[in-house]
Image (spheres, coloured by chain):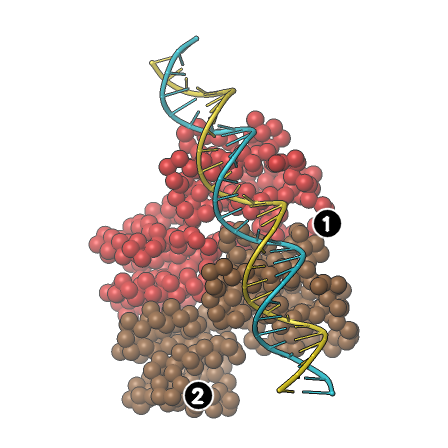
Chain colours: A red, B brown, C yellow, D cyan
Amino acid sequence: MSRTPHILIVEDDREIATLVSRFLRNNDFRVRAVPNGREMDVALRDGRFDLIVLDLMLPGEDGLSLCRRLRNDGAIPIIMLTAKAEEIDRILGLEMGADDYLVKPFNPRELLARIRAVLRRAGGVPAPEVGESSLLAFAGWRLDKAVRRLFNPQGERVALTGAELDLLLAFCERPRRVLSRDQLLDLTQGRAAAPFERSIDVLVSRLRQKMERNPREPELIQTIRSGGYMFSPEIQVAPAMQAAPEQPALPASGSR
Amino acid sequence: MSRTPHILIVEDDREIATLVSRFLRNNDFRVRAVPNGREMDVALRDGRFDLIVLDLMLPGEDGLSLCRRLRNDGAIPIIMLTAKAEEIDRILGLEMGADDYLVKPFNPRELLARIRAVLRRAGGVPAPEVGESSLLAFAGWRLDKAVRRLFNPQGERVALTGAELDLLLAFCERPRRVLSRDQLLDLTQGRAAAPFERSIDVLVSRLRQKMERNPREPELIQTIRSGGYMFSPEIQVAPAMQAAPEQPALPASGSR
DNA sequence: CCGGATTTGTTTCCAAATGTTTCCATCGCC
DNA sequence: GGCGATGGAAACATTTGGAAACAAATCCGG
């Protein structure tokens, strides 16, 4: 995928943070740097990241704790930075689950190399995470992430194109929040919006055509004027998909 | 993996070799050190090792070549040692498949830490650590890696050509992830894709013809537009192959 | 080592999917 | 009501992947 990997750096030392950020940017990564765990949470809510570089020593919640938390809810790769070589043992002993680590002071090239290695190992894009339970439900609809299929409240299959489904997934991962076109584009395609880009609008429109009872009066995807869009229903994570009684996909109601 | 891990060191510098060996032994590993690739092959024939520490620069066959060979016949974890930092890029660029690497001169503690990390990663993860059991199962299908045979949910043999089977195996080892054509080509043939290469597409198509209920609406192999493909089903590693009632291979349903 | 069968890769064509542009209705504000 | 900004919709252009046909490579039995 053409998408540039997005790195999140959690590091309170301003100097290191800027240095590393700049270096990584020069090497074709998109970078966001935050100084502590709380900011990290905010950043994670807003965007999708491919890898986190995490300082061990942080003000507030410390790196180890953050690492453990991250591990719990997702498989996002982590590289730890530690100040002293002796701490390595501690880290490993605790099995906190980072994918790699680096001892300060380190050579940026080394970090770059390890980031590339971890990303490669992770198998490329952590794309629309197909977590454990691949089945989501909202407002009567069901969405199977593994097979990328959508079923309406009547249980009929509704055919979505790939981009439509990606967008719906992005919405599902951040429901009931206003998402700017820019965020949505980042979430679905990992790129920033060009000045007059309208593709998200078009996609929302097509989704509405297929999903809304009355596309003029959307119930699922709300337009937030000059803000973006918001996905209103509440999302449930369903346990597992029983072999669905094979039903022919609706021909996506006379679109085009 | 309750037994003490067994490490094989391939390193021609006698001094380093003994130093490292002693250090690792002091830290609860069993260690065997050999000076070159030939000896390595002998050692591998004799014993079972959990991890190989491989020097890049070796007399005779060099580390990269050895690494590639090792990767071909097994999943044994490898840590590379390189003399210069600049070589890292080369290593990574070549995608030779080491699990980690270390730049000389290194601190033995560092090596120890990385060995532990790699072992943990390799052993702990419920990953498709398909080492022993050669029988995989997914969505009702069964795939015997040892004899390279595939059986459909009805228990009938489905004949796959070699390339098709390789591709299926690659998918099975990385299920539910978006794999680019390039990655797939690398995984199946160890080569990079040429600019307009379409061979993976064709292969996917042929696999679908043989495996999907309705190739137009794939349930197993999803197309991720401008991203690659994703293998949807969950993989189980089956215990052992009961002597399957030998059945003639289906003639792969009138294809071609 | 030969000739045919099979497998694998390449090319081409085509339909579907996606993005872009443009026009227009609507909204909010004055 | 008028006006600029904003988003919806339709038309259009471009990109992408599936399928078929073809060509090259490999296998296999003699």
Q: Is residue A115 visible?
A: yes
**Which residue is more in the foreground, C21 or A243?**
C21
Kindly state the secondary structure of the residue where label 1 is placed.
loop
Q: Residue at left 52%, top 71%?
A: B189
Residue at horizontal 66%, vertical 77%?
B147
Q: Judge by depth and name the residue closer to the eye, B187 or B151.
A: B187
Q: Residue at x 29, y 55 (%)?
A: A26
Q: Name the quadrant containing residue B5.
A: bottom left
Mark 2: give few (<14), some (14-19) or many (20+) Cα within 10 Å.
many
Say few, some or many: other residues with alpha carbon within 10 Å of mark 1 (under 14 / 14 to 19 / 20 or more): few
Q: Chain of mark 2?
A: B
In front of the other: A210 or A96? A210
Q: Quadrant of residue D26?
A: bottom right
Given residues B197 and A31, the one toward you in this image is B197
Q: How far across and how far down the image is residue B59, in percent?
A: 35, 88
Residues at marks 1 and 2 touching, judged by CB atoms closer than 8 Å = no
Amino acid type of the residue tagged 1 in the rendering: Glu
Count of residue discs = 2
- Secondary structure at badge 2 equals helix
* Residue B17 vertical position relative to residue B255 in the rendered view, above or below: below
Q: What separation in Å lies between label 1 and label 2 (alpha carbons)?
A: 54 Å
The picture places residue B141, in percent across and down from the top left corner, at 69, 65
Percent of width and height locating residue A249: 68, 44
Q: Amino acid at mark 2?
A: Met
Residue B223 higher or lower than B39, as above or below: above
- Residue ID for mark 1: A246
Residue B75 picture location, percent across and down:
50, 75
Which residue is tagged 2?
A: B40
For residue A214, the mark is: none
